[in-house]
Structures are given as C-alpha cells and as structure tokens.
Image (cartoon, coloured by chain):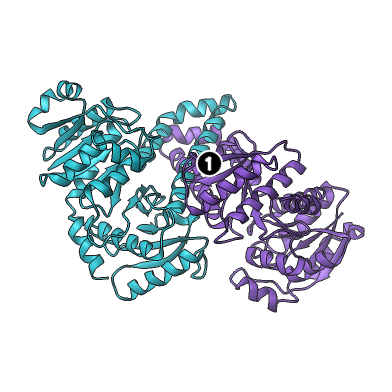
Chain colours: A cyan, B purple
Amino acid sequence: MKIIIDTLGADNSPHAMIDGAILALEENAEISVVIVGDEEIIKEKTAKFKDRVEIIHTTAAIDCHQAPAMAVRSGENSSVVLGLSALRKNEEYSAFVSAGSTGAVLTGAILKVGRIPGVLRPALCPFLPTKTGNQTMLIDCGANMDSKPENLLQFAIMATEYLKASGRENPKIALLSVGAEDEKGNELVHEAFKLLKQKTAEGKINFVGNIEARDVLNGEIDAVVCDGFAGNVLLKTAEGAMAFAFSKIKDMFYTNLSTKLGWQLCKKEVNKMKAAIGEEAAGGTIFLGILKPVVKAHGNSNAVAFKNAILFAAEASRLDLKDKISAALSAQ
Amino acid sequence: MKIIIDTLGADNSPHAMIDGAILALEENAEISVVIVGDEEIIKEKTAKFKDRVEIIHTTAAIDCHQAPAMAVRSGENSSVVLGLSALRKNEEYSAFVSAGSTGAVLTGAILKVGRIPGVLRPALCPFLPTKTGNQTMLIDCGANMDSKPENLLQFAIMATEYLKASGRENPKIALLSVGAEDEKGNELVHEAFKLLKQKTAEGKINFVGNIEARDVLNGEIDAVVCDGFAGNVLLKTAEGAMAFAFSKIKDMFYTNLSTKLGWQLCKKEVNKMKAAIGEEAAGGTIFLGILKPVVKAHGNSNAVAFKNAILFAAEASRLDLKDKISAALSAQ
C-alpha cells in the first residue's frame, strides 16, 4: 500500500514529516510511501528505505495564511496539489497525509481528488478522547459552514459506514444540541432531527437523539453530528478548556513546599497522562467523503504524531469507504 | 434595595435558596429580600431577619421539564411568575434571582417584566473564568437560537454598556468564529463582523475582531459575542472538558504509591482550586436586556453559590443598565 506524504507547509516541515514517514516504514512493513517535497533532503534521509520510497520533487509550500481556493488554483507546483493530483491519477496510491494548511488540503481534496458519488459535502472528522476511553467521532469539525439538514444526515450516514467498517457494531449517532430533549435546538437541529429519526426508523442508522456539548466527552456515543461551525467551537473549546485546567493544575503544584514535593512524586504520571491525551487527540483527522482517504495531521505535529497520522491513513484505506459510503448514500 | 428570591424549582430547593438569602442578608446590610415560596418554612428560617424579609407565598414550582412558554402562561401561581410579576409591578423591587428552570425564567422575564426599549432579544451572559483571571463575558449562551446579525450587534452594545458600568474601560469585544482571521466564519459571522466594524468606526464599541474558541479562556478580551447555539456549545464544552481533565488528574493521583502520597500532599490545594473555579463560574448569570436585572443561578446551586448570585444581582441593579442600554441602542 502506497501512502502519499506531504512534507511541506507545517510547523516542523520538512524534517518531522520525513522522520514520521521513516517511523511508519519501520513500524508497518506493508506500507510504501510517496514523499512530496525537497528531493535532496528526502533522498538523504530515506536512503535506508529506498525500495519503499518514491519522491515527487517540489519546494513550493502553501502557507496557512493564503486563501485556500486561490492557493490551490494558482499552486499547481505546491506539494498539496502535486500530492493530491497524484492520488487521483495513480491507482496504486492509496491515501494522502498532510500537516499543512487545512483549508488547502480540504479544497485540494475536493478539486483534485473529488467526492465519493452521492456525497454533497465531505466533512472533517476528528476523534475525541473520552472518559470511558471509547473515542467519539466529531463530524463535522469545520470543513462546512452553514450546513443544511441533508448535509447532517449524510454526515450521520458516512460516520455510520466508517465506524462499522472499523469494527464498531451499530454505532450510536447523536446530534449536537443545547440539551438532550427532542425539542431543543435551532432550526437546523430541528430539521436534521426529523431526517435522522426517519433514517433510523428505516434501519439505516442508529440515531440516539440530541446530546448536550457537556456530555460529548462522556464516551457514551460513537459519533456526534453537527454543523462545521458548532463542531469547530466544540473541538477548540475542548482544547482550550483542557489547556486551562492543566495550567491550573500546574499552578497548584507550585503553591507551597508540600505541593512542590507532590509534583516530584507525580510528575512522571502527569506527563504520561498529558502525552496520552495529546497523542489520542493527534492521531490524524480524516476528510470523509473524498474518493480516497485524505488525512490531515495537526499543524504542529512532531515525527511520532505524523507517523500516527500515516498509519491511520493506511488503516482508513483498508476500509473500502468509497464503495460503502457510495452504496449507503445511493440507498437513501 | 429589595431583591426578589425564587426558592422553588431548583435541585436544592427550598432550603439552599433560603439559606443563601440569609447569607446575603448577613453579608450585605443594604439588602432586603422578598422571598417567594412556602411561607411557613421561610418564616421559620428567617425569623432573625424579619424586618428585612417580605414573603410571597406559593408552593407551585415550574419543573425544568415543562415547556417554558406553556409553563409560564399556565403557571400564574408559580414562584417564577409571581416573582417576576412583582418585579415589574413594584417600583421598590430591584432584581430577581432564581435557580429554577432556565427556560421559564427567560420566558417569564420577557413576558412578565419586559425588554428594555430598543432591545430586540435579551441575552444570557455568564462570565467565564480565564487564565489571566480577567473574567470574560459570553453573550449569548443560549437564550436565542438562530440569531440575526443585528442581534449580535446589540449583544456587543449591551455587553459594552454592562462592562463599562462595572468599571472596565473601553471593553474589548470579540466575535466567536472558527479562526481569528477577518474572513473566517459562517454567514452570520460575516454579516455581524461588518456591523461590528462599522459600530467601532463610529466609536460606539471596541470590536477587536474574530476569536477562535480555543483562545476565549486566555482572558485577553472582555466579552465574546455569538449566537446562543454556539455560545451554549462553548459553555457546555468548557464545563465538560474541565470535568474530563479533572477526572484524568484524579485517576493520575490513584496510579501508584508515589502518586497517592502526592495526593496527600496536594489534596488541600487541589480542592481549593476546584472550588475557586466552581465559584467563579457559578456567580449567577444575568439575562441582559430586561427592564430590571433578572439573574439565573445554576440549578444545582448550594447556599453559598446562591448567595453569590443574590449579591451579583444587587450589584447589577446598581449599574443603571436600563437607561444606559436604552440610550446606547437608540443612538444606533
């Protein structure tokens, strides 16, 4: 299986990306990689794996401050566009991973790779860590502003297919709202609620009702469906609030001699816990609804996080999502 | 100053509410209270303060599971309706505090007290604790679904008047979006952005641009303006994510002998910190845009939290918000 890897445009480009690719090659013998970036650097770093590495040379990165649509249209030589075009054209290539500009990756995926037949709007779907350890998919976290009820219905269907393919039985889908009661929410939620109920009555999905944002991290559902604006607010607030809580904990450990000693006794486990949450959250985010898996890694990924995103993309490409999603949507 | 206190419909009703009123009377000699609820219980508990306590007798509570509009219309004898009607009719009464059904309090406030002239939609505005300690107002956190750009503009104006009246100079107002860049957001944000820019050019408010949810808890702004759906997602996610982080910390302390000893050394400070965050977050939330201050306390308030909400309401009633907001809106 050949995974295309974009090495440009991220905070730690290109070295962390190339190192991540090497780690992925070491960890999974079934993977080959197509590395997009500066040939000279890539060749030197990956010499050991030269049988499993192809290179697409470019030094043109898309900056995350450029307007995505324009950047993609005018950036024919950029790593994002070259990588995504190769994904579309070459049957051998299975997936694409980038830690570069989210906007450019999303726009490029739609324009250069294309949507799965029947998909109105692809959606960006991170997995959230939860209290029970059962990761919850958030769909959509910001690819789409101003979604329509039928978009949310499609998100629920795509999430169901993805989760079933990854081994979850009868995945529980909830709709993000301002309370768990059926009548809570805005117009979009009211309309989407009806569509989701109906699709559940037809046995196509397992919609369990509205969920309040407070309960999303409890781990009781498999996916939460929402408009990209609300999903982005949820994802970013969770990040900000966790950072806030941990900064308070850090301050607490510095309060007095007793707590400072406490820190010495706990620091190993605190750091382990924070790393575990960070890693869970940074596994890579799939842009669901594109013909082949396109995976976005965090812009500040280090080599290990990027390796995880590559392995996640390899996993996703085994799920046969194109046919499953297309069939589920055409049966709508 | 006479504050009306609803003692029914909350998790710890009526005792925590009556005890909270007593604490408020003890702490602030300028306050008198009008307590709505079971006369017998109230009389017995408040005997010591009988010169500063009036009673409006009722035992009819509005349940938080009742549809608010219906509950208010059919609940003429409910504590919420009796209290809010008294607030409207009696010039001596300054503010109303309840820990009961949020929906009933909001609907009742609009129907029984009424809006400040010029206000299209009142908004529910909690203060969020932040890293710097500078509390940030969130307006709106869920009173309004499907807001229009002009509602968001009014939220910014009302927040500005409130914050100026409470002593903040030139308060910084940001607009919740999916990124800090001007062009980020959904249709509502794009339109509201223009209105806020224009009002800033006229010198009426100090709009500092879009803010991403991740940065709201950094404490760099005074108020964040948003639609009630997004605001509710932000508020509830922050609560959920903090609870998640603290549950992880708790698990960490139970990992091994070393961390268990760490817990013994830190538990006093950990509990102090959690209580401080909880108390900051639970000071009472004003429903801004109503003729007199209507304050909602958390449904699970204990006596201390409820006392804080009462003192907060007394504070708000000193700010002369009606005239200031009305003047600012008519100058629009």
Q: Residue at x 87, y 65 (%)?
A: B90
Q: Residues within 10 Å of mark 1 (few under 14, many from 20)?
A: many
Q: Badge 1 sits on which subunit?
A: B
Lateral position of residue B128 relative to residue A191, left or right? right
Asked if residue A325 shows in the view, the reply is yes
Q: Position of residue A70 (x, y in %)?
A: 34, 40
Q: Label 1 amino acid?
A: Ile
Name the residue that disc number 1 marks: B211
Using the image as rendered, state which of residue A263 and residue A281 is in the foreground.
A281
Q: Position of residue B141 (x, y in %)?
A: 59, 54
Q: Residue at x 89, y 57 (%)?
A: B52
Using the image as rendered, state which of residue A26 and residue A33 is in the foreground.
A33
Q: Quadrant of residue A7?
A: top left
Q: What quarter of the picture does the N terminus of chain B occupy?
A: bottom right
Element under label 1? strand
Using the image as rendered, state which of residue A290 and residue B134 is in the foreground.
A290
Lateral position of residue A321 relative to residue B184, left or right? left
